[in-house]
Image (cartoon, rainbow, N blue to C red):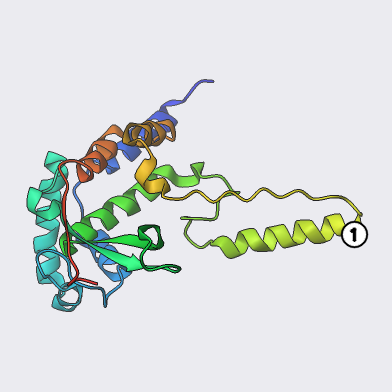
Amino acid sequence: MKTNNKEKSKTLTTLEEWRKYYEIPEIQICIKEIKTGRSLGPGDILLELIKSDGRALTQRIRQLMNACMKQHKVAKGRKIGYISSLYKKGNRKDLNNYRALSLTNTLSRLWVKVLYNRLREEIGNTISEDQNGFTPGRSCIDSLFTLQQLLEKRIRKNEETHITLIDIKKAYDSVPRHRLWTALKAVGVSKHLIRTIKDIYNENKASTTSTYI
């Protein structure tokens, strides 16, 4: 299949777009999307303060993020997190009934949000229509609705239905990171963005605390 010059030009332009510096409107969108009222992590910077300050502080954040993007990394001080144990259910003496909650620097949360939005744009329509989790505008309710429709249809036809439910526990802790990079590359994510995302996982430090809950 041949690609004409117009299509090539469009592809190159798209690739160049991802290498441009972050602009204030992009950062403002991310600031707006992050939820407030959360416990503070290292640095004690309130997100409410960033939201209320307006363009002046956003401009400083933009300069900081552009420096991070240029170097494909952030300062080690923003890779520190406070980990608290959040009780879920069952026997309180069983550690399996607790979920680890990591509280990170507010600017780090904003940085991750900016990268997430860019990643979402790069992935585009490569995510399967069957996936509802972690998909904007969709949720598990969509899956339940689809399942209900299928069950009703098969009941009317007097057909058997077999359902397999898989509960994957602690999946995030067990996924080999190198496979994540391979998966991102397979769906067409740029090397530039993959390299920047990799840095989030490098040289992280965390301390347990009972104060930040």
Question: How many circles with numbers are drawn on the protein?
Answer: 1
Question: Could you say where residue 146 lies in the image, as x and y percent from the top left?
Answer: 69, 58
Disc 1 residue type (three-letter): Arg
Residue at the (38%, 39%) spot, across then down: 175
Task: Identify the element where label 1 is drawn.
Answer: helix
- Outermost residue, top direction? 1
Classed neighbour count for the residue bearing mark 1: other residues with Cα under 10 Å, few (<14), some (14–19), many (≥20) = few
| Left or right of 169 on screen, residue 208 | left
Among the 4 quarters of the image, the one containing residue 111: bottom left
Camera sees residue 88: yes
Q: In this view, does 54 lie above or below 22?
A: below
- Outermost residue, front direction? 93
Among the 4 quarters of the image, the one containing residue 128: top right
Question: Could you say where residue 113 lies in the image, as x and y percent from the top left?
Answer: 28, 57
* Quadrant, the N terminus: top right
**Residue under pointer 1:** 156
Residue at the (38%, 41%) spot, across then down: 174
Residue at the (68%, 63%) spot, across then down: 145
Question: Could you say where residue 213 lies in the image, as x and y percent from the top left?
Answer: 24, 72
Among the 4 quarters of the image, the one containing residue 186: top left
| Left or right of 125 on screen, residue 21 | left
Q: Is residue 97 above or below residue 127?
A: below
